[in-house]
Image: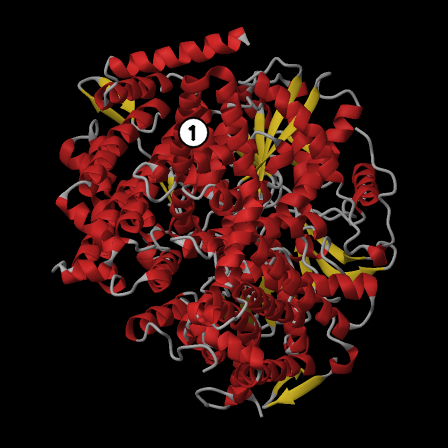
């Protein structure tokens, strides 16, 4: 018992101290950045996995800009993911020699990468502006279905290999090459370099999305989500706002697409397939759509659970089974997603702490036991309650 | 490893009565994996040779992964019962590529960097294999491709816009170009003035037709190549495509359809009177689906090819493989199973001949002479493609094996220079 | 009559093929549309249900009783029961939730993965085939093309199911409850309708129809674990074109898509994937409620 008290005391003291010393957002940010830099020197595969996580997180976060803040669920955002990856891949393949001629072969790979990224995002905008304009006229499930249809149209165009550009089902292979600046040679595709490059693009993108969400524009979006009719009555052009959000969301997905092409070293037609559109949807549901960071947490769970499964041959052979169960379980038992679950956990720890302050360890343990059994027992009861509601 | 008793079952009762032997093995393997995880980063000196197997284990094409798994598990069992590789046990870590390049590359990276595998083998999808080739070169690890068939994979980089071949990528089974060389040989003996194709709507479908046409023209086959139909993968009704072909009235059709698409097509083609209207149908990968499928869907008397035939060559090695496999799984081995089986043996021989080191393995693989169930063959130095023959034959039901077999079967030996000559007029690389 | 000599734009046999394709698509789409119309649930696992119907039929004819028709019934009932259990266990808790529609979509998507893997575990990945029942194992010549009698039977079966459902929904007491509940659930609830039970019953019926579609299709195509993946997207397209929730719309939508698929390959060598999606976009933009809106219409 005494050790128990000791640990709780120490944890409590540490927490109080941290708060009173001012653990501000800035300090957390610095800590996070140090963590990011340290990770770069961790196991090489973890660097790869974390790079992919950052990309999927941006994909999901950009998707949720539309879903979480205007209530429009797109089931076709893969078309923008593919737009980014193909824009990048095609420029790298076809424009490299010309770029080398203009800027010299040393720095050419880097310049081509930047041009490819610009091309990818421009291509996405070119698709998103008309597709968004047409799609935002619809709502709810109809919006989901029309974006699904547009996405699959893009997929079918890619596999038709128009003008020999996309190489059909094989996809376009991406080679990032060796850049030479001022006598220094570096490979953009090198694991750690690409990791920092991805971080340097994803973090500002996340910040930009955060700014959008917290701007007057974002406030209007939230008003639209809560009640489109009321927003319209207040003089908001609902369709226009949705259209603009659609375009911004698509552009950031395009950035994620650009980055995946460089990481996986291929622009694959499956980047445009509806199963890829399902990735941000699933990540957002797992993470919690109502929290800004929800899709990021969801992307983390999505990718790391799949990785965890692959570490066990017995599970790997049937990974879909366990993945499916996880999806069902998350939706049923974690209504707010994993991010909500984390917040719930924090609240619960606070309650335990309060009980401890009131009556010491025993009270805290009692509270913990009681609240846990209450939560576990709730599954059956809530079903009964709901049944009763409708009668 | 324990062989499960009672794996021989009444064939009529096969449906739903499959013993999931691999599941048992897999469960046993969990312990090993957990140990690997505890040790975190795998290293080469842990007393086992570790190989990474990458196949499609989920979705539409999971048949291919399941077949390959039978092959490599058999090889592992045999090798470990007979002293392993240089006294070390061999362990296979299997990963699902999901037929998707992003996933495949992540899985490959994990196999190399987390599990510290000594070599890689597998790959079903040509698209995935092409995306993977530059990656294995970068990682400096040998990759033995056992199924993906595109010639561009073993055509050295630079030979053609799409070529991705490099010194780390090998293929131990015959490629699309070898197979189509055989098909063109078959075509040269048939009295057909008009050929058509019905193939799956992706690169494999189109390349089959391109190579078939190119080789046939190279061999001076006097025929026209007319109607092409490419139904999407997972089409549930091929009837519109079937009637389009029947209406075009070709005398011969070549089809690279596979898996559930092939069996669906066969039922519907039969119903529409395909085999009355069209004299010759050449099934280029049909045997890979026919053997494990329920019943024997390929119609007797038609031509089919295989990358490995369980009865050719008539060597003791092949016979032993066939008998053991049949005893274990109750079907004749497909080329997928044989390719995966042989890949494990290739690693065994390369490691025993040189040492367990990526460069050494690659050097040994280069130009290596090898013999397996498929026969004796050599890896071409330029391309790293195994120079194995094209095998075409007539589909015949065999009562003894309760299965379709190719009888009579014709083995077309290939010669790299000859293939290049035949393709000279086209822009296609032979990849041999 | 030699079809290649007729310059006809669309031959009779193309129409038969189109109807045949459409009738199978209808059997899967109608249950999806019914469930959406009444419960507001877009069931992603509907294609997986269709697949289970085919597998159960195969298993029953191979191992239990060598009677195709009983096996079809077993397949449909089994899928209906699985659907009802899934509804009670995992969909029902989500009706009252805000954003519940998305949650339902994800849960049913989770079941796609689970069912897919479970089927692969039990039956393996290899394709299975089954013969048409002996009583229908003969060929019929229609306008110069040969069709199996069974294929024509399935076309007839689709018409019978359509008619039966229409009578059931419009003429029976249960149908009246379904219609009432689909247009105003709270009102129905206040009038004493046991809504949860009704929902389960409708989910059973919709799943039963998916199972029936899979079971009846088993002799026409081979059965493998991926069977459901393609049909679910086709079914989405059909219910959108026909109108979400409309059974008659599902019928017309299925026949239209069937005809498009039958005639398309002769005119367009490439792009057959694009055509149905293009049709879907056009319908959604011009008439988002579909060609026919509302249940029972």
Q: Residue at x 31, y 37 (%)?
A: A259
Residue at 50% x, 91% y: name it.
C6
Q: Measured along the vertical axis of the image, is residue C14 above or below residue C210? A: below
| Residue A374 appears anywhere in the view | yes
| Looking at the image, residue C228 lies above or below residue A121 | below
Q: Residue A22: image x %, image y %?
A: 23, 16
Please identify the quadrant where the N terminus of chain B is shown: top right
Number of marks: 1
Task: Give x and y (percent) for residue B396.
Answer: 78, 62
Q: Is residue C146 above or below residue B315?
A: below
Q: What residue did someone put label 1 on?
A: A348
- Element on which disc 1 rests: helix
Furthest residue to the front? A359
Q: Is residue A68 left or right of residue B394?
A: left
Direction from residue A294 to residue B221 in the image, left or right? right
Q: Nearer the viewer, residue A384 or C149?
A: A384
Q: Position of residue A319 (x, y in %)?
A: 58, 40
Q: Position of residue C246 (x, y in %)?
A: 45, 76
B312 sits left or right of C10 in the view = right
Towards the viewer: B422 or A197: A197
Res B256 seen here: no
Mark 1, Cα crowd under 10 Å, few <14 / some 14-19 / many 20+, is some
* Colouring chosen for the image of the structure: secondary structure
Q: Residue furthest bottom?
A: C1
Quadrant where the C terminus of chain B lies?
top right
Q: Going by the image, does C280 lie left or right of B8?
A: left
Residue drawn at x 47%, y 76% as measured from the top left:
C180
For residue A159, above or below residue A361 = below
Which quarter of the picture shows residue A25?
top left
The residue positioned 67% from the left and 87% from the top of the image is: C140
Which chain does the numbered disc 1 sit on?
A: A
């Amino acid at each position: 018992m005494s050790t128990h008290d000791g640990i709780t005391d120490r944890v409590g003291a540490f927490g109080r101290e941290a708060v009173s010393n001012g653990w501000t957002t800035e300090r957390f940010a610095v800590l996070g950045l140090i963590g990011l830099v340290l990770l770069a020197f961790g196991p090489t595969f973890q660097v790869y996995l974390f790079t992919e996580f950052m990309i999927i997180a941006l994909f999901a976060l950009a998707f949720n800009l539309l879903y979480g803040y205007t209530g429009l669920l797109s089931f076709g955002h893969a078309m923008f993911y593919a737009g980014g990856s193909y824009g990048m891949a095609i420029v790298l393949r076809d424009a490299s020699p010309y770029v080398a001629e203009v800027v010299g072969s040393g720095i050419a790979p880097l310049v081509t990468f930047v041009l490819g990224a610009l091309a990818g995002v421009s291509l996405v905008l070119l698709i998103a502006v008309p597709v968004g304009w047409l799609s935002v006229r619809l709502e709810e499930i109809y919006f989901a279905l029309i974006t699904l249809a547009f996405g699959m149209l893009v997929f079918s165009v890619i596999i038709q290999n128009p003008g020999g550009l996309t190489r059909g089902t094989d996809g376009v292979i991406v080679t990032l090459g060796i850049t030479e600046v001022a006598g220094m040679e570096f490979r953009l595709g090198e694991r750690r370099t690409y990791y920092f490059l991805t971080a340097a693009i994803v973090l500002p993108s996340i910040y930009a999305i955060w700014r959008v969400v917290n701007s007057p524009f974002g406030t209007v979006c939230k008003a639209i989500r809560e009640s489109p009719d009321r927003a319209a009555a207040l003089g908001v052009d609902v369709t226009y706002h949705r259209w603009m959000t659609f375009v911004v969301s698509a552009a950031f997905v395009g950035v994620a697409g650009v980055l995946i092409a460089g990481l996986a070293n291929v622009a694959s037609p499956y980047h445009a397939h509806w199963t890829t559109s399902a990735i941000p949807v699933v990540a957002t549901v797992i993470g919690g759509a109502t929290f800004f960071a929800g899709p990021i947490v969801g992307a983390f769970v999505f990718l790391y659970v799949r990785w965890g499964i692959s570490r066990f041959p017995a599970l790997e052979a049937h990974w879909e089974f366990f993945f499916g169960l996880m999806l069902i379980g998350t939706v049923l038992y974690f209504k707010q997603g994993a991010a909500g679950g984390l917040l719930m956990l924090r609240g619960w720890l606070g309650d335990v702490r309060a009980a401890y302050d009131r009556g010491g360890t025993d009270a805290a343990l009692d509270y913990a036991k009681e609240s846990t059994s209450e939560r576990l027992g709730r599954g059956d009861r809530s079903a009964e309650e709901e049944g009763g509601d409708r009668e | 490893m324990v062989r499960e008793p009672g794996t021989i079952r009444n064939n009529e009762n096969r449906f739903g009565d499959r013993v999931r032997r691999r599941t048992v093995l897999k469960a046993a393997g969990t312990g090993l994996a957990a140990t690997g995880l505890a040790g975190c980063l795998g290293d080469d000196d842990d007393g086992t040779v570790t190989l990474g197997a990458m196949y499609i284990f989920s979705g539409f094409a999971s048949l291919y992964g399941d077949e390959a798994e039978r092959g490599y598990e058999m090889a592992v069992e045999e090798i470990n019962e007979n002293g392993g590789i240089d006294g070390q046990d061999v362990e296979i870590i299997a990963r699902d590529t999901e037929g998707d390049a992003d996933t495949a590359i992540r899985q490959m990276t994990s196999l190399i960097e987390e599990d510290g595998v000594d070599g890689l083998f597998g790959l079903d999808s040509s698209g995935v294999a092409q995306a993977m080739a530059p990656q294995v070169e970068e990682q400096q690890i040998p990759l033995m491709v056992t199924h993906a068939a595109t010639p561009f994979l073993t055509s050295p980089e630079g030979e053609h816009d799409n070529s991705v071949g490099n010194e780390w990528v090998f293929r131990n089974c015959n490629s699309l170009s070898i197979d189509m060389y055989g098909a063109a040989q078959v075509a040269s003996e048939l009295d057909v003035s008009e050929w058509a194709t019905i193939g799956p709507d992706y690169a494999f479908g189109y390349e089959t037709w391109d190579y078939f046409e190119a080789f046939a023209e190279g061999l001076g086959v006097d025929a026209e190549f007319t109607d092409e139909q490419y139904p999407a993968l997972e089409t549930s009704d091929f009837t519109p495509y079937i009637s389009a072909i029947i209406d075009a009235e070709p005398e011969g059709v070549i089809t690279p359809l596979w898996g559930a698409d092939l069996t669906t097509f066969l039922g519907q083609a039969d119903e529409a009177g395909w085999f009355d209207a069209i004299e010759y149908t050449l099934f280029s990968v049909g045997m890979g689906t026919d053997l494990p499928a329920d019943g024997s869907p390929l119609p007797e008397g038609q031509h089919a090819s295989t990358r490995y035939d369980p009865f050719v060559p008539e060597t003791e090695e092949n016979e032993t493989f066939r008998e053991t496999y049949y005893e274990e799984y109750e079907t004749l081995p497909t080329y997928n199973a044989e390719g995966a089986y042989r890949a494990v043996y290739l690693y065994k021989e390369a490691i025993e001949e040189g040492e367990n080191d990526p460069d050494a393995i690659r050097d040994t693989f280069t130009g290596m002479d090898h013999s397996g169930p498929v026969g004796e063959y050599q890896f071409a130095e330029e391309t790293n493609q195994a120079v194995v023959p094209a095998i075409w034959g007539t589909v015949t039901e065999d009562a003894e094996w309760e299965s379709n077999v190719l009888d009579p079967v014709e083995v077309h030996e290939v010669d790299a220079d000859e293939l290049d000559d035949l393709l000279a007029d086209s822009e296609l690389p032979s990849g041999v | 009559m030699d079809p290649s000599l007729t310059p006809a734009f669309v031959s009779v046999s193309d129409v038969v093929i189109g109807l045949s394709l459409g009738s199978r698509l209808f059997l899967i789409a109608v249950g999806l549309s019914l469930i959406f119309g009444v419960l507001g649930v877009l069931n992603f696992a509907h294609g997986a249900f269709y697949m289970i119907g085919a597998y159960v039929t195969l298993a029953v004819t191979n191992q239990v009783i060598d009677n195709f028709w009983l096996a079809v019934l077993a397949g449909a009932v089994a899928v209906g029961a699985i659907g009802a259990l899934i509804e009670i266990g995992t969909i029902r808790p989500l009706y009252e939730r805000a954003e519940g529609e998305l949650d339902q979509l994800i849960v049913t998507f989770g079941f796609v993965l689970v069912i897919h893997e479970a089927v692969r575990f039990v039956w393996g990945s290899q394709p299975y085939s089954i013969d048409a029942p002996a009583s229908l194992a003969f060929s019929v010549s229609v306008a110069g093309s040969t069709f199996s009698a069974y294929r024509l039977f399935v076309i007839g079966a689709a018409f019978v199911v359509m008619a039966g459902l229409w009578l059931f929904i419009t003429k029976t007491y249960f149908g009246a409850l379904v219609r009432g509940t689909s247009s105003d659930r709270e009102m129905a609830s206040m009038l004493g309708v046991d809504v949860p039970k009704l929902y389960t019953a409708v989910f059973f019926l919709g799943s039963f129809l998916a199972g029936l579609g899979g079971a009846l299709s088993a002799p026409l195509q081979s059965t493998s674990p991926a069977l459901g993946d393609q049909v679910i997207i086709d079914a989405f397209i059909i219910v959108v074109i026909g109108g979400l929730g409309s059974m008659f719309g599902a019928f017309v939508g299925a026949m239209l898509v069937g005809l498009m698929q039958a005639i398309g390959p002769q005119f367009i060598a490439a792009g057959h994937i694009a055509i149905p999606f293009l049709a879907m976009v056009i319908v959604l933009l011009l008439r988002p409620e579909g060609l026919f809106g509302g249940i029972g219409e």
